[in-house]
Image (cartoon, rainbow, N blue to C red):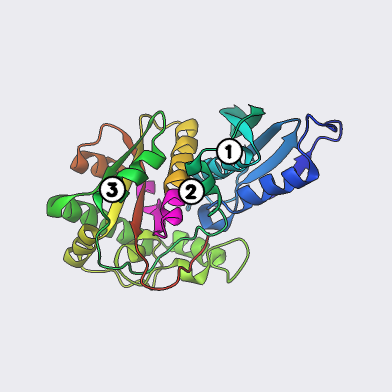
Amino acid sequence: MSVARAEADGGRDSWSAAESAVLAESVHCAPSVHNTRPWELALHGRTAELRERTVLAAQHDPEGRDRRISLGAALANLALAIRGLGWAAEAATGSADDLVTATVVGTRRSRPTDAENRRRRVLADRRSHRHSFDRRELPDGIRDALLDALAAPGVTGRWISGPDEALAVARLLDYAARVFRDNAEYQRDLTLWATPRGSGVRPDAFGAEGLAAVGLTTSRTRLPDESLLADRIQREAVLVIATSADTPQDHVRAGAAMEQAWLEAASRDLAASVMTQPLHLEEVRTGLAQRLGLTAVPQMLMRFGLPVEPEVGDR
């Protein structure tokens, strides 16, 4: 990630050096596909701009959906950081050279809400948790709070509920995992991205069991039985995040909504992880919408729960 500042923007109408550091750190903490942080941050005046940049091979993000979801997560963090600095944050998305841009402008002085402060305080604590959850179910009140957190124009959330839905989703995820496990080119690229630190896929990003095992599948992954996977889906809180359309801007909106829900979860000492890879297969996205009766376009799955061990995993 790089940060650019306009030299001519000195004075009280520009972000100070300290404020700029806060904004840069906020986007650095955002989750991103394979830890690549596919954006550049530019600061000028009271404006902060994120610019999409391409980083992954076509096998891993064929339409750029994951990197735009990642940019949306960074946008959510950026807006929270600006709110934390005491400014009203006005966000907008656009495009330049066929890549998405997202800007947040500090328009006027405004105190952050309690919810914004709570989420902002856990920006650096949020992690992907790809291990088992405690068997206790999330109370309905918590589920409602997570749905409220991701609420945004054009974005909806839908919990997977009941044995029939769980089995239908399990079959789709098992199908996707087998397709990617048997794709030699995909596996070759994934091996190149699997690095112990820095940009790339951390070793603990590959789950060994349950939903985590089918979210990011290697050639060595032991896939769970469909019935066991369906049982795990039923016991966990699994959320489908969908959008009214499927434009690049919709991907950004989905990413921003995802991050708000994730931070809300982290502020309540809950763990979470995101699954997008299976939805790169159009038949899986279509099947998911059909089996759940969705009129919106599925963009990702999220799982929430209480961790049974300290949270580990990639950002």
Q: Which residues are magenta?
A: 262-281
User: Which three-letter amino acid code belongs to the residue tagged 2?
Assistant: Asp
The x, y position of residue 159, in whole percent, is: 26, 46
**Which of label 3 and label 1 is nearer to you?**
3
The x, y position of residue 115, in whole percent, is: 47, 43
Is label 3 in a helix, a strand or a loop?
helix
Residue to which mark 1 is pinned: 79
| First along the sequence among labels 3 and 1 | 1
User: Which three-letter amino acid code belongs to the residue tagged 1?
Assistant: Ala
Q: Where on the picture, by quarter, is residue 296? A: top left
Residue 14 in view here: yes
Asked if the stretch drawn in magenta spans residue 271, the answer is: yes
Q: Which mark is residue 61?
A: 2
Toward the viewer: 54 or 305?
305
Q: How many marks?
A: 3
Q: Are marks 1 and 2 in contact (CB under 8 Å)?
A: no
Is label 1 in a helix, a strand or a loop?
helix
Question: Compared to 198, does 247 lie above or below?
Answer: above
Question: Compared to 126, does 23 lie above or below?
Answer: above
**Which of label 1 and label 2 is nearer to you?**
1
Q: Is residue 106 left or right of residue 74?
A: right
